[in-house]
Amino acid sequence: YLSKQALLGGAGILIMLFVSKVDYRAYISKTPLIRIKPVTILYFLCILLQIAVIIFGEETKGAKRWLQIGSISFQPSELSKIAVILMTAYIVQLAPRRLDKIWGFIRVVFIIAPLLLLVISENFSTGLIIGIIMVAICFVASKKKAYFILSGLVMGALASLMIFFVDFRSDRVDAWINVETHEKGYQILQGLYAIASGGVFGKGLGESMQKLGFIPESHNDMIFSVICEELGLFGAVALILLFILLLWRIFIIAINAPDLFGGLVATGVLAHIASQVLINIAVVTSTIPSTGIPLPFISYGGSSLMVILFEIGIVLSISNQIKAQR
């Protein structure tokens, strides 16, 4: 796990540095060879990849999320997050005042819906993140906020239907309510044992007992519980403060961006990272029902890590343009 993640992390850092040197406005500019904007190409590529997942994808725990190409497997839904950030920001910056009315927001939803629905059909948790990204960008760009309450209620109702009328998702709600007695509450219960046993300063780095076969996916979605056990409350708070610092820096870049497109792209990246951190920690601490959301930069998984580093590269590109203009 360590060697593979280190290799992918190193590749992700190189990608981040390369992307940071590319002008972020190039994503919405026509290419010399093909008179189609890169953001449009990326968006339709992600739609094709999601269709390929449904047809050819490997089924894991009842859902198809991965494509296997030779010895390489990747999760196209992670790439879809970048596509949604860029496409939503592009659509909004073309006519931002349309978002002052609900029909402008519905227009954005209608354009993003094909990709969003394809993701949700096989990966509800990632679809939730993509939906949050889209709404966050529109919310920031709109001067009128009241209709977002109605939109939130409608989307919440649709999400509830998708949870309670799908057996394995409703089972997760039951397990959350009866975590000590439900057979599917084992993972969360073991994670809570790890958090409780860590105390204030933890057992020491590498000294977790719960990760040695007790917590399923301890290196992935449940990594925060291992951090709590090894580094205690002190380590958990330190990690959360680091995330807050990162989000604060992205926020500063967003409000100082040279143009609306740059500000909205940075907002989308902020919404992506913030929502994943909040949902992952909430799941691990049993604040909300279990769902498969990795902890950014920390959880094992090459697709997620490389996509987030790519997004950070775009944010650094926006930051570079701020400095260039000054």
Image: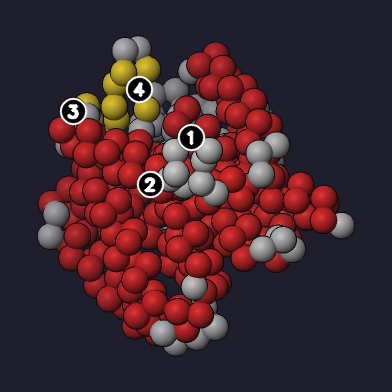
Say the numbered circle drawn on residue 33.
1
CA distance for labels 4 and 3: 12 Å
For this view, does 150 lie left or right of residue 157? right
Say the numbered circle drawn on residue 56.
3
Ranked by sequence position, the earlier of labels 1 and 3 is: 1
- Whole-percent x and y of residue 127? 33, 52
Above or below for 98 versus 188? below
CA distance for labels 4 and 2: 20 Å
CA distance for labels 2 and 3: 20 Å
Q: Residue 148, can we see it?
A: yes
Say the numbered circle drawn on residue 255.
none
For discs 1 and 3, the disc positioned in front in the rendered view: 1
* Label 3 environment density (alpha carbons within 10 Å; few <14, some 14–19, many ≥20): some
CA distance for labels 1 and 4: 30 Å
Picture quadrant where residue 147 is located: bottom left
Q: What colouring style does the render use?
A: secondary structure
Q: Do callouts 1 and 4 mark residues in contact (Cβ within 8 Å)? A: no
Residue wearing tag 4: 73
Three-letter amino acid code at the position of disc 4: Ser
Along the viewing direction, whichever of 196 and 160 lies nearer the viewer: 160
Ranked by sequence position, the earlier of labels 2 and 1 is: 1
Ranked by sequence position, the earlier of labels 2 and 3 is: 2
Above or below for 18 versus 131? above
Could you say whether the residue bearing mark 1 is in a helix, strand or loop?
loop
Ranked by sequence position, the earlier of labels 4 and 3 is: 3
For discs 1 and 4, the disc positioned in front in the rendered view: 1
